């Protein structure tokens, strides 16, 4: 069974110039649930000064649809963010750190050492309330400021997150420079120690996100981060494009004969709806094909 973590509401919307009203976000959540997605990262508790697109985090939590089997999570940068967490409706939180010193400072205005201290505090507080914590590791495959990242740095940060108590680490290709061979090599180094505890988070800057996803699946990874319509990017990673599109990942899974409950047509409809809201073409190739077939009556 492959798990998809939908990050469009957080990683996707934070990179859009337009700020969506809370009501529209709630409608998006309802539609994603209708498409059978069950793991939704709905917002971030980063200070609104830095990510104004997610300034309504507290209000959003009050309006989340309460549905059985739906796992809501939010990104928490520090103890101030943790103090805003409401459980329920959140089932878990996520913390993040970069394998690149420069990117970490640009992203959160903290050194890696300072971020490690903050993460320890957040996870310790979450443990007291029995709240599961997921870890994000950025710039695993390359950094916009430092270029290639040594595997030793990736391994060190990965070990750190697990030692702190996260249940899973999502390996992030923050600027979309990973190649299938690189993905294979890194996973073959990490999987013997952390099999079943690793996820992947690919951006599609060079058009390889889907190929990298395929390699990750071949290497035994069963948790994939994706964003509806291919929304996404990183405000502090110049050149980063959108995430791998959720509908493209689902199409890949179905093409590989992997059974899922995800509704591919509904996911394409959601992406089409978002395209109209933002009044721009979304990067999803699957969406473009879907709309073309729909126009000529092929659906």
Image (spheres, rainbow, N blue to C red):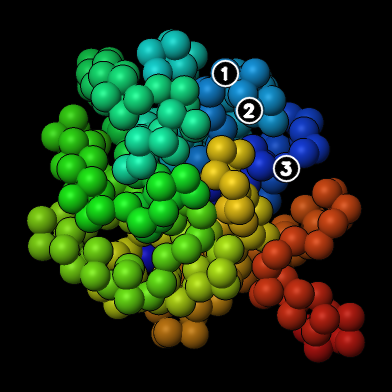
Q: Residue at x 42, y 85 (%)?
A: 257
Q: Earlier in the sequence, mark 3 or mark 2?
A: 3
What SS does tag 2 mark? Answer: loop
Q: Earlier in the sequence, mark 1 or mark 3?
A: 3
Residue under pointer 3: 16
**Residue 263 visible from this viewpoint:** no
Callout 2 touching callout 1 (CB < 8 Å): yes
Indicate the quadrant containing the N terminus: top left, top right, bottom left or bottom right: bottom left
Residue identifier under label 1 = 47
Quarter of the picture containing the C terminus is: bottom right
Farthest-out residue, front:
146
* Residue 169 visible to an observer of this rendering: yes
Local packing at callout 3 (Cα closer than 10 Å; few below 14, some 14-19, many 20+) is some
| Residue 276 location (% of width, % of height) | 86, 55
Residue drawn at x 43%, y 29% as measured from the top left: 105
Question: Front-most of 21 and 193?
Answer: 193
Residue designated by label 2: 51
Q: CA distance from mark 3 to mark 2?
A: 10 Å
Determine the CA span between mark 2 and mark 1: 7 Å
Residue at image position (27%, 24%) is 113
Tag 3's secondary structure? loop
Image position, residue 178 (x, y; %): 42, 65
Cα gap from disc 1 to disc 3, whole angstroms: 17 Å
Q: Quadrant of residue 137?
A: top left
Q: Where residue 259 sits in the image (x, y, percent)?
A: 42, 76
For mark 1, give the secondary structure.
loop
Of all residues, the one furthest to the left in this rendering is 193
Q: Is residue 105 above or below residue 205?
A: above
Closer-to-camera residue (271/144): 144
Q: Is residue 255 above or below residue 51?
A: below
């Amino acid at each position: 069974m492959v798990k998809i973590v939908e990050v469009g509401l957080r990683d996707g919307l934070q990179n859009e110039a337009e700020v969506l009203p809370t009501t529209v976000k709630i409608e998006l959540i309802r539609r994603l649930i209708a498409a059978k997605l069950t793991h939704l990262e709905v917002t971030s508790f980063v200070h609104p000064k830095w990510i104004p697109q997610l300034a309504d985090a507290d209000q959003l939590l009050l309006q989340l649809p309460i549905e059985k089997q739906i796992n809501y999570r939010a990104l928490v940068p520090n103890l101030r963010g943790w103090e805003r967490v409401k459980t329920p409706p959140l089932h878990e939180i996520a913390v993040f750190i970069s394998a690149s010193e420069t990117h970490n400072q640009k992203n959160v205005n903290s050194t890696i050492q300072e971020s490690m201290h903050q993460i320890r505090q957040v996870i310790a507080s979450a443990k007291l309330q029995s709240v599961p914590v997921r870890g994000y590791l950025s710039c695993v495959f390359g950094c916009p400021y430092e270029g290639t990242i040594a595997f030793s740095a990736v391994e060190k940060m990965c070990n750190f997150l697990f030692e702190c108590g996260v249940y899973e680490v999502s390996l992030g290709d923050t600027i979309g420079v990973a190649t299938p061979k690189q993905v294979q090599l890194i996973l073959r180094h990490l999987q013997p120690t952390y099999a079943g505890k690793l996820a992947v988070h690919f951006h599609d800057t060079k058009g390889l996100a889907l190929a990298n996803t395929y390699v990750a699946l071949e290497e035994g990874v069963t948790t994939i981060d994706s964003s509806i319509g291919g929304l996404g990017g990183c405000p502090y990673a110049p050149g980063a494009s959108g995430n791998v599109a959720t509908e493209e990942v689902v199409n890949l899974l179905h093409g590989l004969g992997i059974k899922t409950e995800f509704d591919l047509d509904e996911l394409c409809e959601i992406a089409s709806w978002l395209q109209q809201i933002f009044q721009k073409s979304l990067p999803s190739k699957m969406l473009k094909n879907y709309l073309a077939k729909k126009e000529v009556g092929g659906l």
